[in-house]
């Protein structure tokens, strides 16, 4: 199974209902978004006037560049196929690609908030939510579209799909030849590949030739410099524990001063 989403550009009216539904469902901060809608054009494309929208989100790629860049400590995680009950145990960091449904997910409890995965994603589909803090990270947690996995597991559609007023978003199993998403792929739906890369995006687009050309020519991303991403991630993984230790020592110092002051005041009174 490989979950995927089709965006039918001929149906999208740019109303932003999908983005609002996503923010409400997942409490996404105002300044960020798990998905987005950009207006494209009007512009001339091959002597024709083209105008469309770019509803974007995580592509849950076949070969996600974000996953191997996570520097968090790995753990053994067991995955279960919801259909067959088959299990598979993998060694994963704080983000991974599910071996059974193909979605890319994040373990917020282990994310250190370094931003390496966000830097690696050529689609800018990840961000650091500075409002999600814990003992592991006081800088926030990586966040992105999850294809609303909890909703899907409960038998519902992703929030954006359910809310779309024109039915422009279609969700399903790309590996099922009889699914609606597979039928769109047969008609020509395709994903946006980055310049010089073949990541296999599973969020795909379908529309008029001129509108598809406008979208794909205007929104072709570039792969990140992974060496630079890795250097930043390595520094973050080294600095964060040290800063936390310093912070704790600082707190202990403040407590010590307060205790000493209290003892001194007590001696003066006596």
Image (cartoon, rainbow, N blue to C red):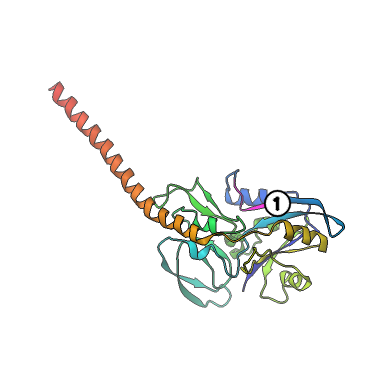
Query: 196 left or right of 73?
Result: right
Say which quarter of the image contains residue 166. Answer: bottom right
Front-lying residue, 72 or 270: 72
Q: In this view, does 269 lie above or below 127?
A: above
Counting from the top left corner in percent of width and height, residue 3 is at 63, 68
**Residue placed under numbered mark 1 in the picture:** 37
Query: 134 left or right of 191?
Result: left
Q: In this view, does 236 lie above or below 89?
A: above
Front-lying residue, 159 or 41: 41
Which residue occupies 62% across, 71% down? Answer: 2
Q: What element carries label 1?
A: strand
Which residue occupies 53% across, 62% down? Answer: 66
Which contiguous range is marked in magenta? 32-37
Counting from the top left corner in percent of width and height, residue 76 is at 42, 70
Counting from the top left corner in percent of width and height, residue 140 is at 47, 49
Say which quarter of the image contains residue 143. Answer: bottom right
Label 1 packing within 10 angstroms: few (<14), some (14-19), many (20+) = some
Query: 26 left or right of 163?
Result: left
Say which quarter of the image contains residue 267. Answer: top left
* Image quarter of the N terminus: bottom right
Counting from the top left corner in percent of width and height, residue 102 is at 58, 69
């Amino acid at each position: 199974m490989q979950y995927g989403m089709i965006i039918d550009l001929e149906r999208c009216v740019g109303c932003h209902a999908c983005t609002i539904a996503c923010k409400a469902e997942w409490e996404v901060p105002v300044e960020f978004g798990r998905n987005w809608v950009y207006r494209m054009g009007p512009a001339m494309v091959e002597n024709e006037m083209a105008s469309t929208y770019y509803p974007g989100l995580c592509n849950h790629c076949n070969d996600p560049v974000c996953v191997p860049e996570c520097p968090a400590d790995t753990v053994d995680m067991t995955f279960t196929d919801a259909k067959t009950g088959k299990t598979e145990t993998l060694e994963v960091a704080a983000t991974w690609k599910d071996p059974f449904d193909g979605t890319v997910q994040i373990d917020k409890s282990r994310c250190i908030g370094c931003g390496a995965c966000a830097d690696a994603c050529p689609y800018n589909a990840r961000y650091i939510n500075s409002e999600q803090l814990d003992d592991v990270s006081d800088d926030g947690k990586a966040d992105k579209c999850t294809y609303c996995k909890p909703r899907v597991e409960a038998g519902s559609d992703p929030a954006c799909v359910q809310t779309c007023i024109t039915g422009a978003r279609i969700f399903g199993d790309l590996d099922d030849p009889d699914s609606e998403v597979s039928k769109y792929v047969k008609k020509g739906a395709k994903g946006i590949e980055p310049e010089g890369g073949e990541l296999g995006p599973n969020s795909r687009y379908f529309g008029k030739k001129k509108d598809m050309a406008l979208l794909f020519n205007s929104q072709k991303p570039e792969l990140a410099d992974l060496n630079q991403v890795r250097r930043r991630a390595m520094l973050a993984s080294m600095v964060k524990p040290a800063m936390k230790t310093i912070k704790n020592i600082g707190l202990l110092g403040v407590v010590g001063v307060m205790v000493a002051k209290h003892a001194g005041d007590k001696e003066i009174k006596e």
